[in-house]
Image (spheres, grey):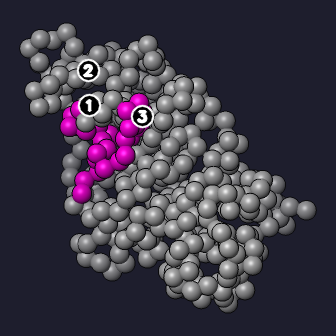
């Protein structure tokens, strides 16, 4: 894609960046001596040429020299990139403070670290059957990327690849809501809020001593209107019992119809039939949590996951921006900086979209 920091658009981008972002480059350790780039703006544009411009390191250095932005070698640029993560993270955090959506998350967990985790498959252009998987974790509501790790695609998406600490609250989609992963989180003293697929996570009713499988459709059909409800259930892993709360709410008709279209399109793509129960489950949003009822109520659990959806949209933008030719694959520090730069790019794109009306009809501010 075209870089966000071309000469024509730089003045607009600069106006969106937080105050004193230049001096933070030194404070955050992104630069100690200004060599190759004449100022902080040039350094930022240089880094974003690579991150948002889909250029290799060598191409970035050549393009920067041609545009008069900077004159650096590939190795010098690589070292600058590895040091940029904290600087980019500070800018992301400052920009996200302008959004109102983070206030609810901050108040709900009283200082606990909230992590949204996800994974994305990345395949080399022209490669057949080989590629990478990027596992990344973002701290909410700051959108601070705290982990970015490349593995082969043989390594499954799992919470176990992330640096989870006791007290953390981990938010994820239904691919992570499995017995082994939930047990791992609970044993580490962490909590989970995850979208749940009843077919992937068999559970029993809390009051059922015989362990008979919980009949989800029977209970979900009892939901009236858009009123949320929860059930206490349990699951077993390696001989130990674990308790969960499962909260659900019925979708609107429009949301359900949109979901059905997506399910049917995926089925056509993979040439398979859609099971009737799949379409019925699509009528509901089902979210599990390991948090106690006194920590977060039924509607709050669903509201927190709804807040995560804004991050999911950011993830979707990131995945659409990820082009394997520009992804640092072998070094964790450069991968983390690249991911944090992508987070910053997503925030800038969101800001541009929000401000677009103010630029009409000549395309810039006075």
Give the extent of the magenta segment.
Answer: 155-183
Badge 2, how many Cα within 10 Å: few under 14, some, many 20+? many
Quadrant assignment, res 237: top left
Taking the image as shown, residue 196 lies to the left or right of residue 252, namely: left
Q: Earlier in the sequence, mark 2 or mark 3?
A: 3
Q: Tell me, yes or no, whether the two marked residues, 2 and 1, touch with CB atoms within 8 Å.
A: no
Between disc 2 and disc 3, the foreground one is 3
Tell me which residue sits at (49%, 22%) in the image. 300
Between disc 2 and disc 1, the foreground one is 1
Q: Earlier in the sequence, mark 2 or mark 1?
A: 1
Residue 365 visible from this viewpoint: yes
Across and down, in percent, residue 214 comes to 19, 20
Rounded to the nearest angstrom, the CA distance separating label 2 from label 3 is 18 Å
Mark identifier at residue 243: 2
* Quarter that holds the N terminus: bottom right
Badge 1, how many Cα within 10 Å: few under 14, some, many 20+? few
Check if residue 175 falls in the magenta segment: yes
Number of numbered tags placed on the structure image: 3
Across and down, in percent, residue 321 comes to 50, 64
Check if residue 285 falls in the magenta segment: no
Across and down, in percent, residue 216 comes to 24, 23
Badge 3, how many Cα within 10 Å: few under 14, some, many 20+? many
Report the residue marked by disc 1: 187
Label 2: state its secondary structure.
strand
Report the residue marked by disc 3: 168
Label 3: state its secondary structure.
loop
Q: Tell me, yes or no, whether the two marked residues, 3 and 1, touch with CB atoms within 8 Å.
A: no
Seen from the viewer's position, the closer of residues 99 and 87 is: 87
Label 1: state its secondary structure.
helix
Taking the image as shown, residue 113 lies to the left or right of residue 161, namely: right
């Amino acid at each position: 894609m075209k870089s966000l920091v071309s000469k024509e658009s730089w003045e607009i981008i600069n106006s969106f960046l937080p105050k004193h972002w230049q001096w933070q480059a030194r404070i955050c350790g992104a630069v100690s001596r200004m060599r190759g780039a004449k100022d902080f703006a040039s350094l930022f544009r240089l880094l974003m040429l690579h991150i948002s411009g889909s250029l290799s390191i060598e191409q970035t250095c050549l393009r920067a020299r041609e545009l008069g932005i900077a004159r650096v070698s590939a190795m010098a640029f690589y070292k600058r990139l590895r040091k940029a993560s904290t600087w980019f993270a500070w800018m992301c955090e400052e920009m996200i403070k302008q959004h109102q959506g983070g206030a609810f998350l901050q108040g709900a967990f009283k200082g606990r670290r909230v992590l949204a985790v996800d994974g994305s498959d990345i395949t080399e252009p022209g490669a057949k059957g080989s590629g990478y998987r990027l596992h990344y974790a973002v701290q909410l509501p700051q959108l601070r990327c705290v982990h970015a790790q490349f593995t082969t695609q043989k390594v499954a998406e799992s919470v176990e690849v992330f640096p989870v600490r006791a007290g953390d609250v981990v938010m994820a989609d239904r691919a992570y809501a499995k017995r082994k992963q939930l047990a791992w989180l609970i044993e580490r003293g962490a909590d989970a809020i995850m979208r749940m697929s009843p077919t992937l996570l068999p559970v029993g009713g809390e009051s059922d001593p015989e362990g008979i499988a919980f009949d989800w459709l029977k209970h979900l059909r009892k939901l009236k209107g858009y009123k949320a409800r929860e059930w206490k259930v349990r699951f077993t892993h390696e001989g130990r019992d674990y308790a969960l709360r499962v909260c659900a709410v019925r979708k609107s008709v429009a949301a359900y119809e949109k979901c059905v279209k997506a399910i049917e399109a995926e089925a056509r793509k993979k040439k398979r039939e859609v099971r009737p129960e799949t379409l019925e489950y699509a009528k509901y949003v089902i979210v599990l949590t390991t948090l106690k009822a006194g920590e977060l109520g039924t509607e709050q659990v669903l509201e927190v996951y709804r807040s995560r959806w804004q991050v999911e949209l950011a993830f979707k933008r990131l995945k659409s921006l990820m082009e394997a030719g520009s992804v640092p694959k072998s070094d964790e520090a450069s991968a983390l900086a690249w991911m944090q730069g992508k987070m910053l790019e997503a925030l800038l794109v969101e800001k541009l979209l929000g401000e677009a009306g103010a630029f009409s009809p000549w395309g810039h501010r006075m």
